[in-house]
Image (cartoon, helix red, strand yellow):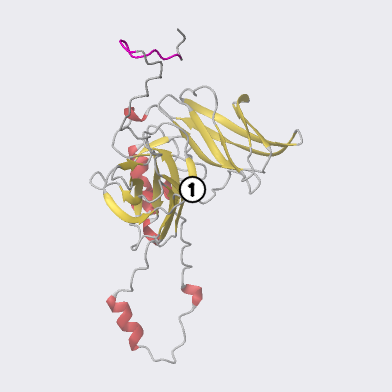
């Protein structure tokens, strides 16, 4: 008897195949996902993605409900939260309640940073407002020569990462390109690695070009640049802790057309660092920018410096890939 043959029920003369037993099991629904996250410096957001058609989609920042909407017949959904997102770091996830009542959580989450100093315009102090209203209407405006130019709003950053932390990250909203990380033709934007040193590089490049990465002049990995220009490169093996020279060549027609070269540090495992909050230094970061994003004031860069003095020989020299501890407000 072959594995596919079916015998008759014992004790009967029937040769008809026994019908398969019915089951109440239903296929596992696909997890909801993010496609778009766009946030203005003021905290106004547009979030879109996919879920099972008819699902009631809820977006959370950790345990706080950001908003909810319903997926259409194609499984597409768009959410514009009624309120502005709070300044600082956020961790967005999806819970989709399907028509049958079952809830499915997203496999990936969005790590979001909204700069603290640009979320809303602070009203002028009462004394200043009173002085302004007391001035004659014909008074000329104050001389611009003594006024400091208003700082430009820093763009929020949104990165899609696996919920469990394993796997590559995807940029949904780009950070500001920093100096020394390339041009519009070739940019390095993301350096990330897990506790074993498995590295992920990402950025923008020339569509259909070919990339080759080097670590201390040894080939690290290769990748093609897709049509949308957003590339990712994941070397086959882990990188040991240490400081290296990272180089990325973009080849067009077999020749090097653009090149990025910069120092890169693969730090020791996060578990060996003090504190509960950490940041991986990205291309273009400085202690000032990290402090401004984390604490709202760049002048607090000394807080990060003091907590990571064993890694920082010169406050003006930090390297992409370094993992810094960020002290909490109580520790500051």
Query: Is residue 320 visible in the rendered structure shown here?
Result: no
Q: Quadrant of residue 231?
A: top right
Question: Which corner quadrant holds the N terminus?
Answer: top left
Name the residue carrying label 1.
172
Judge whether 217 appears above or below 135 on screen.
Answer: above
Q: Which residue reaches farthest front? A: 13
Secondary element type, mark 1: strand
**Along the line of sight, the residue nearer the viewer: 224 or 269:** 224
* Residue segment shown in magenta: 5-12
The location of residue 241, given as percent across then percent down, is 45, 24
State the residue at coordinates (40%, 49%). Answer: 112
**Along the line of sight, the residue nearer the viewer: 194 or 183:** 194
Q: Is residue 176 magenta?
A: no
The location of residue 129, given as percent across then percent down, is 32, 80
**Along the line of sight, the residue nearer the viewer: 69 or 124:** 69
Q: Give the side of residue 167 with respect to residue 231, left or right.
A: left
State the residue at coordinates (46%, 67%). Answer: 150
């Amino acid at each position: 008897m072959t594995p596919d043959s079916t015998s008759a029920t014992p004790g009967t003369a029937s040769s008809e195949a026994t019908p398969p037993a019915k089951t109440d099991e239903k296929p596992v629904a696909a997890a909801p996902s993010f496609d778009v996250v766009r946030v203005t410096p003021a905290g106004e957001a547009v979030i879109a993605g996919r879920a099972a058609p008819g699902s009631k989609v809820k977006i959370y920042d950790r345990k706080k409900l950001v908003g909810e909407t319903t997926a259409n017949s194609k499984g597409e959904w768009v959410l514009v939260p009624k309120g502005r997102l709070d300044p600082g770091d956020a961790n967005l996830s999806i819970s989709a309640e399907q028509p049958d009542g079952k809830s499915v959580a997203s496999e990936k989450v969005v790590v979001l940073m909204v700069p603290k100093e640009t979320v809303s315009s602070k009203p002028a102090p009462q004394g200043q407002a009173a002085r302004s209203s007391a001035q004659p209407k014909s008074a000329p405006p104050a001389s611009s020569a003594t006024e400091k130019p208003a700082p430009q709003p820093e763009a929020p950053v949104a990165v899609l990462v696996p919920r469990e932390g394993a796997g590559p990250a995807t940029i949904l909203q780009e950070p500001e390109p920093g100096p020394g990380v390339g041009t519009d033709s070739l940019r390095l934007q993301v350096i990330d690695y897990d506790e074993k040193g498995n590295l992920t590089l990402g950025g923008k490049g020339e569509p259909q070009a070919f990339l080759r990465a080097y670590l201390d002049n040894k080939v690290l990995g290769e990748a093609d640049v897709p049509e949308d220009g957003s590339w990712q490169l994941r070397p086959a093996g882990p990188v040991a802790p240490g400081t290296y020279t990272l180089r990325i060549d973009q080849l067009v027609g077999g020749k090097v057309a653009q090149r990025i070269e910069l120092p890169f540090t693969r730090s020791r495992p996060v578990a060996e660092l003090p504190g509960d909050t950490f940041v991986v230094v990205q291309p273009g970061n400085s202690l000032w920018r990290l402090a401004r994003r984390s604490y709202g004031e760049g002048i607090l860069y000394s807080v990060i410096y003091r907590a990571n003095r064993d890694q920082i020989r010169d406050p003006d020299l930090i390297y992409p890939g370094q993992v810094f501890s960020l002290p909490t407000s109580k520790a500051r």
